[in-house]
Every structure is written in C-alpha cells, then in structure tokens.
Amino acid sequence: MSRDARWKALLELLVERGRLDVEEAAAELGVSAATIRRDFDGLAEQQMLVRTRGGAVVHGVSYELPLRYKTARHASEKQRIAKAVAELVAPGEAVGLTGGTTTTEVARALAVRGDLVSGAPALTVVTNALNIANELAVRPQFKIVLTGGVARAQSYELVGPLADGVLGQITVDVAVLGVVAFDVIHGAAAHDEAEAAINRLLCERAERVVVAADSSKLGQRAFARICATEAVDTLVTDTAADTQTVRRFEEAGLRVVTV
C-alpha cells in the first residue's frame, strides 16, 4: 500500500472513530507500527490530525475530511447515483452542480452521455466547484460558468459574496446538491455555513432541485442547513437506504429514486 493510500485510509478511519491507536491502525492496514507512527507524524505536520500518546485524534467533533483525501468509500453507490442523476438532465438545459464527491461523479456521468456530444451548447453547467469546472472545461460542447469567490481547501468550492454576485444574475433548470446530511425534518445540510449559503442560493435560482446522496447521508444532521426538505423535488440514493426513511421522504412530497 502506498503512503498516499495509507494516509487516505487513516483519515477515513479517524473520521469514523474519532481516535486511533498505533497498533489498531497497523492491524487495520496490515503494516508495521513504525510505519503508522511515521504516517501519523506526517499527517500531524500537515495539521490533518492531532497526535496523542500512542495514537491520534481528529481535530474536532465536526471534522470535515478534505475532498482530496476522500477515497472510494461508497464509490459504486455514488457512480450509480450519478448516472441516475445525469439521466434527469435534458440536452440544452442549464444545470447547477455544487461541490463534493457525488456531484463530481455526476459531472463525469454527464460528460460521457452519448446525446451530449454536440450542441450549442449541449449543456450549460454552473458550478462553484473548481475541480468540476476543471474536468468539464475540456468538453467544448459544454458551456461552463464558474462562480467567483474564495476557495475552500476542504471541498474546492468557491464561497463568499463574489460567488453570490454571479448566482444572483442567473437561473438554472436543475440544481444538483451534494450534501453531508439529509433529514426529513431538518433538511439538507453541509459542514460549513459559507458553503451552505452558496448551495442555498443555487437552489433558489433553480426550477427544480435534486439531492444526490448515498444512504449513509440520510437521516443525518450537520451544522449548516442548505435548504428545507420541501425545497427538494427529487432524492437520488442507493438501494441500501432504510425503507422507512425513504417512505418519510416520499410522504414529504419528494420523488425518491433508489439505484
């Protein structure tokens, strides 16, 4: 296992558990304790974790794993969700994409759709995510609109009043939200309030709103609310979603697509 792969795995384990012991981590990854100590020290130098005697802990309860360190957790589910979301977009439409791993997969699914290989434009994509704009900018049939703003290192998303200024001047047919939590009562949410504010504005500028979220996000709460459940038209999730949770979303008026 490469160092980069180990670091990603260690950070994901830390987010799940809050703390890790050296011996525990070594057993999980199948490497020596000395290797894990060096990895912990390297991650601590980058302020990705806090070293403790014999292990490491995350920085805080609401710690957000940076996008560049997220690995293939729920990868197959996210790809299925992305394909289903992409099929909800019609040629020629304007689609807004927030940042995140699932919406990045949506962008990739749109890029390979056979009926979107040409057009004037085939799609207009509005995003505040630098990585999504970078991936789609090479597609000449797509018109890419990137908001201004200040980049968040954790998610590659642009936030702040400069992003507000662009979104306040446009409308989109569909907004696709990547969320860290989606609960029937508390709505869709993100870790960061500035990120949530931009996502909220994108929802307000959209004719319809789609939440793309794997089942681990459902029934969860997070710090910063994006929008109420009633503001969402469609939820696309995976088949592992709890049936009662799905039913509650449907009773709230959402169309739920499980893939």
Image (cartoon, grey):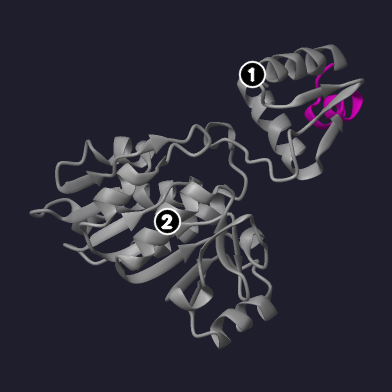
Q: Give x and y (percent) for residue 80.
A: 48, 58
Kind of residue sitting beneath label 1: Gln
Residue in the picture at 42% in, 41% down? 157
Answer whether residue 112 is magenta in the image: no
Name the spot of residue 130 as percent of width and height, x first: 36, 37
Number of other residues with Cα within 10 Å of mark 2, as a class: few under 14, some 14 to 19, many 20 or more: many
Secondary structure found at label 1? loop
Q: Secondary structure at mark 2?
A: helix
User: Of residues 227 and 117, which is closer to you in this image?
Assistant: 227
Report the residue marked by disc 2.
Answer: 199
Quote the CA–CA distance across marks 2 and 1. Answer: 28 Å
Q: Residue at x 73, y 40 (%)?
A: 15
Q: Which residues are magenta?
A: 21-32
Label 1 environment density (alpha carbons within 10 Å; few <14, some 14–19, many ≥20) = few
Residue 251 occupies quadrant: bottom right
On the rendered image, what quadrant is the N terminus found in? Answer: top right
Which residue has dot 1 on it?
46
Q: Residue furthest front?
A: 161
Residue 3 in the figure: left or right of residue 126: right
User: What secondary structure characterizes most of the magenta part?
Assistant: helix
Residue 87 located left or right of residue 91: right
Comparing 132 with 59, the one in front is 59
